[in-house]
Image (cartoon, rainbow, N blue to C red):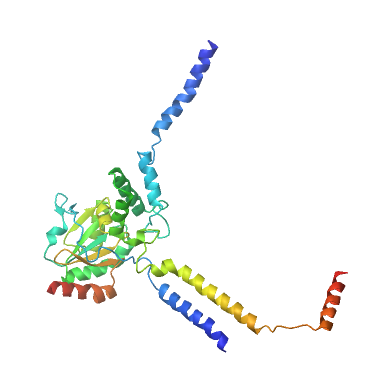
Amino acid sequence: MKRFLLPLAVFAVVVGFLAVGLTLNPREVPSPLVGKAAPDFSLPQLYETEKTFSPKDMAGKVWLLNFWASWCNGCKDEHPVLMQMAKSGEVPIYGVDYKDQRGEALTWLQQWGNPYPLVAVDESGRVGINYGVYGVPETYVIDKQGIIRYKQIGPIDQDVLHKKILPLVKELQTQ
Amino acid sequence: MKRVRVLLFMCAVIAPTGVWADEAKPLGENPQVEARLKTLAVELRCLVCQNQTLADSSAPLAEDLRREVREMIAKNMTDQEIIEFLVARYGDFVLYRPPWRLTTTLLWLGPFLLLLVGGTVLVVTLRRRQKTLPETVLSEEEHRRAERLLSKGNT
C-alpha cells in the first residue's frame, strides 16, 4: 500500500495545479496602470466634432471610461448593463469610440441607445495604446484624483457590476 | 544598325520593369528602422492572439503597436526605452522572456528543481535496489557448471 502513496501525492499536486490553472482566464492580463494616474489625452467628440474631451474635465468626480466600438460583439453584450447604469445615475460612463467609423458608431448608438453623456473618438487607437487596451470592451474606474482604480477587461456583466464596480464606486465617492 | 535595334529592344523590355520597381512600395520607408523593428518585435507578445509575437501577428492591435514601435525607433529611442514604454502599458506579459521577479522565480527555477527531484529519486532508487539484491557467492562446482553452460551456448 505504501508504495502507492508517493505517486498518489504527485497526482494530487498535478490535479491541484490543473484545477487552478485551467480555470484562470488567459485574457485577463493584470494591468500595470491600476493605481496610476489615468493617461491624459484630448480627443474630438463624436457628436460635437469641433469640441474635445480630456480626462482632466472629470477631475473631482468618480467616473467610468469605457472603450467600445460598433464592430465589437462584446460591446453589444455589455450594452444593456451600461444602459441600466446610465438610468440609475450612480456613476457617469464616458465612452471612447475605439478605431471605428463615425457613421457606424452613430447608427449603433441610435439603434441600441446611448448610455454615455459624452463619447470621444479614438480613430487611430493611440489613446487605446496609452491605456493598455488590447480588446474592446474595456472599462476603467477612475477616482476623483484621476487615478485608475480598476480595469475591467471584456464586457461588464451583472456579477462584475454588483460585486466589483458599484461597491468600488461607492467607496471612492465617499472619499 | 542591327546593334541599335537590339539595344532599343532591350530598353523597351527593361524600362517598364524599372517603373514597376518604383511603384512597389516597401513595407517601411527605412530599412534600418525595419531591421530594428524586426529584432524587437520577435521579443514582444501580441496581446490579442497571445501565442504570437508582434512580428507574426496580423491583428489590428499588433499593426498599431508596430506603428508605435516604428515611430519610437525613428525618434531614436533605445530598445530599453521602447520596451519600458510597452511594459508600462501592457505589463510584463508583453515580454516573451519573462523578467526575473519574485512571482516568476518558480517559473525560472522550476525545471531545475524538477531535475533535482528526479535525480535524487533516481539515485535513491538505485541505491536501494543495490541493497536488496543479495550478493551470491558461487561454489567451485557451480562455477564450473556455469562455465560449461556458457561454452555450450557458444558452440
Q: Is residue A133 visible?
A: no
| Residue farthest toward the left in the current orientation of the protein | A60
Which quadrant would residue A85 be assigned to in this image? Answer: bottom left
Locate residue A98, reporting x and y percent. 27, 56
Question: In the rendered view, would you say A9 is above or below A32?
Answer: below
> Which image quarter is the C terminus of chain B in?
bottom right
Residue B54 lies left or right of residue A2; in this view the side is left
Residue at 41 percent across and 55 percent down: it is: B53
Q: Residue at x 50, y 21 (%)?
A: B10
Relative to the observer, which residue lies in front, A62 or B106?
B106
Residue at the image point whose x is 35% and y is 39% from the top? B30
Residue B22 location, x and y as percent? 39, 31
Q: Is A164 left or right of B149, judged from the image as shown?
A: left
Whole-percent x, y for residue B139 in the image: 80, 84
Please tell me whether residue B131 is drawn above or below residue A154 in the rendered image: below
* Front position in the image: A72 or A148: A148
Q: Is residue B20 left or right of residue A78?
A: right
Q: Which residue is more in the foreground, A85 or B135?
A: B135
